[in-house]
Image (tube, helix red, strand yellow):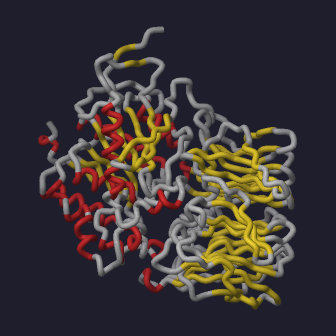
């Protein structure tokens, strides 16, 4: 059947914004207990409420969380490690008050920790039960009434699983993560770090004996400068393992009697940046085998590692992205994954029988035959290189005139310490199915390419990332893949900052969309949360010593350099990048009479969770691109009225 010819960017698509919200179920923390698999799942139709689901060996899936609870930790604001389980007893964090609740063997949940003096002023995350099940260890975070980030304290505490009584274990550092008991319950290991380091900069691996709920012989095991350690874990025989980037790559090591052994000496990454608690990229199948996930050139691979021989065997599964790491139980690997052909879902893999099973409710995971698949590209940036995934416009029903090239949407991931992946993403297909090309950039500073690449953004945020975005547009234009006169750039949070900077530093980009983007760097030295309070020390410079650099690279101070129109999308409850940032940027654009629209989404925080807001944001963005690029299309969308729209054309 011949295709109907229509202008790029105007193609009708069966993939609607409403369908994206139906497929926008988010999966979170995963755990195993007595052969049962547990995971956290969000419900977009309930405002993003998160519930624990359980899949049992008999094939039954249950929702374990009552309707009056929302399982979510807010420690570090990004949370993670929201629940733990021991022999059917679930202890979880409730979002509304951040208290711990105990839910024993499917009984109604009861509060385990006391009500704090101020709402959400005492928070918990990254809990783990002691092997005897009588108490658990947790990261505890305490806030003041005015939520001053400088006064927030973090510590490790021991909590009685029946009474909720607390015992302070470790304090004094700015941050803690991965508290883990040894298999015999006699030792505890954990990570700690201090400002201005982030956990991907420098962390300390600690160990202590634990007797009668008290620590002794507390000492750092690994405390090198510029070494990021990740996920300490105990082998069933009691040997300590962890991931370190001491070789430039996050590789797995074991430590016995002071002797360090590199288990995976490869130029790949077995670690992720610790934005959230409780992510495990490797797990013990038994005392001699590890299942692990590594990242190689932006794509993730599941493998098996034999400890006695050192043999590493990649598993022949089609997945290229593992959302929350993995867990293992009774010869099975439990994970959340996606591929170029499969949307994100929850699976188990039986190692002995080589059998993959889908266990989440989401059955419609297959992509359509006309979806666009990622092309891995490596492009030059001066004497260096950067990476991206390119998606061409794709439709089974429509094509564009042969002498035309498509408009391009440059996507910028957040972080900036993070990465994008090549797995199926309905959010990208939304654009490619309408005739837009998309390039998803792993600019310098992204993870998954070694520490040196990650560190190449240090003190150059707003410069190196922008150079990479400009370079990838030039690369794609030079090879004839895109229309250089119709290039938009979009990003959220840190990606939104790059959007602002790119629009001010180059005329390559003709439109920009910022989702809760950073506009005023100096305000983030105080008007942000504790976890990121000194993040910019490594990305920009020390505050206030380098105040001039902060001023120079803050988009709010350079709006006069901008000519391209903007769409600003912002949640009104965002504690990471406050609403005031987007409002200030809108005022600056207004003063210069640059076409723009600011949409404030009620009840949203750092990222949009509510179905109606997700739909509205997408439709506004599509409407925005079509207005700016003068693309005519017959599609009903949320109304967008750009201020100063007369200056568009």
Q: Quadrant of the C terminus?
A: top left
Which quarter of the figure has residue 500? Answer: bottom left
Residue 224 percent across, percent down from the top left: 59, 77
| Residue at figure coordinates x 71%, y 63% from the top left | 262
Q: Residue furthest top?
A: 1
Q: Residue furthest front?
A: 383
Q: Is the residue 611 above or below the residue 227 in the image?
A: above
Residue 334 percent across, percent down from the top left: 75, 50
- Tell whether 372 sits left or right of 38: left
Nearer-the-camera pick, 146 or 238: 238
- Tell whether 369 sits left or right of 644: right
- Tell whether 131 sits left or right of 539: right
Number of marks: 0
One can see residue 416 in this view: yes
| Residue at figure coordinates x 62%, y 36% from the top left | 342
Nearer-the-camera pick, 62 or 130: 130
Residue 507 percent across, percent down from the top left: 21, 45
- Tell whether 400 sits left or right of 147: left
One can see residue 605 in this view: no
Which quarter of the figure has residue 351? Answer: top right
| Residue at figure coordinates x 45%, y 25% from the top left | 394
| Residue at figure coordinates x 24%, y 41% from the top left | 510
Residue 317 percent across, percent down from the top left: 71, 38
Q: Is the residue 168 above or below the residue 586 in the image?
A: below
């Amino acid at each position: 059947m011949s295709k109907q010819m229509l202008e790029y960017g105007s193609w009708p698509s069966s993939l609607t914004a409403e369908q994206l919200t139906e497929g926008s179920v988010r999966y979170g923390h995963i755990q195993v207990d007595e052969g049962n698999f547990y995971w956290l799942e969000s419900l977009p139709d309930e405002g993003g409420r998160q519930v624990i689901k359980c899949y049992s060996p008999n094939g039954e899936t249950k929702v374990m969380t009552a309707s009056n609870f929302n399982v979510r930790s807010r420690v570090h604001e990004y949370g993670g490690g929201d629940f733990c389980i021991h022999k059917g007893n679930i202890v979880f964090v409730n979002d509304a008050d951040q208290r711990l609740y105990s839910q024993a063997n499917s009984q109604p949940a009861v509060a385990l920790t006391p009500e704090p003096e101020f709402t959400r002023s005492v928070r918990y995350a990254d809990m783990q039960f002691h092997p005897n099940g009588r108490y658990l260890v947790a990261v505890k975070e305490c806030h003041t009434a005015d939520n001053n980030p400088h006064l927030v304290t973090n510590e490790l505490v021991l909590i009685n699983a029946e009474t909720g009584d607390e015992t302070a274990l470790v304090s004094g550092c700015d941050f803690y993560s991965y508290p883990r008991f040894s298999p015999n319950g006699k030792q505890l290991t954990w990570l700690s770090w201090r400002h201005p380091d982030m956990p991907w900069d420098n962390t300390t691996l600690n160990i202590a004996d634990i007797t009668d709920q008290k620590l002794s012989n507390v000492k750092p095991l690994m405390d090198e400068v510029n070494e990021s350690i990740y996920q300490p874990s105990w082998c069933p025989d009691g040997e300590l393992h962890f991931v370190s980037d001491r070789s430039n790559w996050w590789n797995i090591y074991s430590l016995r009697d002071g002797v360090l052994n590199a288990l995976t000496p490869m130029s790949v990454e077995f670690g992720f940046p610790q934005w959230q608690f409780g992510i495990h990229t490797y797990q013990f199948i038994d005392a001699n085998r590890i299942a692990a996930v590594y990242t190689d050139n932006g794509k993730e691979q599941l493998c098996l590692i034999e400890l006695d021989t050192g043999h590493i065997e990649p598993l022949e599964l089609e997945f290229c992205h593992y959302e929350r790491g993995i867990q293992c139980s009774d010869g099975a690997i439990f994970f959340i994954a996606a591929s170029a052909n499969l949307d994100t879902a929850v699976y188990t893999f039986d190692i002995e029988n080589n059998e993959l099973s889908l266990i989440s409710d989401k059955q419609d995971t297959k992509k359509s035959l006309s979806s666009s698949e990622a092309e891995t590209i490596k492009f030059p940036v001066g004497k260096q290189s950067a990476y991206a995934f390119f998606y061409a416009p794709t439709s089974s029903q429509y094509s564009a005139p042969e002498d035309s090239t498509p408009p391009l949407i440059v996507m910028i991931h957040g972080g900036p310490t993070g990465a994008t992946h090549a797995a199926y993403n309905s959010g990208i297909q939304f654009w490619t199915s309408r005739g837009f090309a998309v390039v998803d950039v792993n600019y310098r500073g992204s993870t998954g390419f070694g520490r040196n690449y990650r560190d190449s953004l240090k003190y150059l945020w707003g410069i190196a990332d922008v150079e990479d975005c400009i370079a990838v547009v030039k690369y794609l234009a030079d090879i004839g893949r895109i229309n250089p006169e119709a290039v938009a750039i979009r990003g959220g949070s840190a990606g939104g900052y790059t959007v602002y900077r790119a629009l001010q530093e180059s005329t390559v980009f003709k439109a920009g969309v910022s989702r809760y983007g950073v506009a005023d760097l100096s305000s983030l030295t105080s008007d942000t949360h504790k976890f990121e309070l000194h993040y910019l020390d490594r990305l920009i410079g020390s505050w206030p010593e380098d105040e001039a650099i902060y001023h120079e690279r803050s988009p709010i101070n350079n709006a006069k350099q901008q000519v391209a129109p903007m769409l600003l999308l912002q949640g009104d409850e965002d504690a990471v990048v406050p609403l005031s940032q987007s409002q200030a940027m809108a005022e600056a654009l207004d003063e210069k009479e640059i076409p723009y629209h600011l949409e404030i989404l009620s009840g949203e925080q750092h990222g949009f969770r509510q179905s109606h807001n997700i739909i509205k944001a997408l439709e506004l963005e599509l409407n925005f691109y079509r207005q700016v690029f003068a693309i005519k299309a017959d599609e009903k969308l949320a109304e967008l009225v750009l201020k100063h729209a007369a200056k568009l054309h």
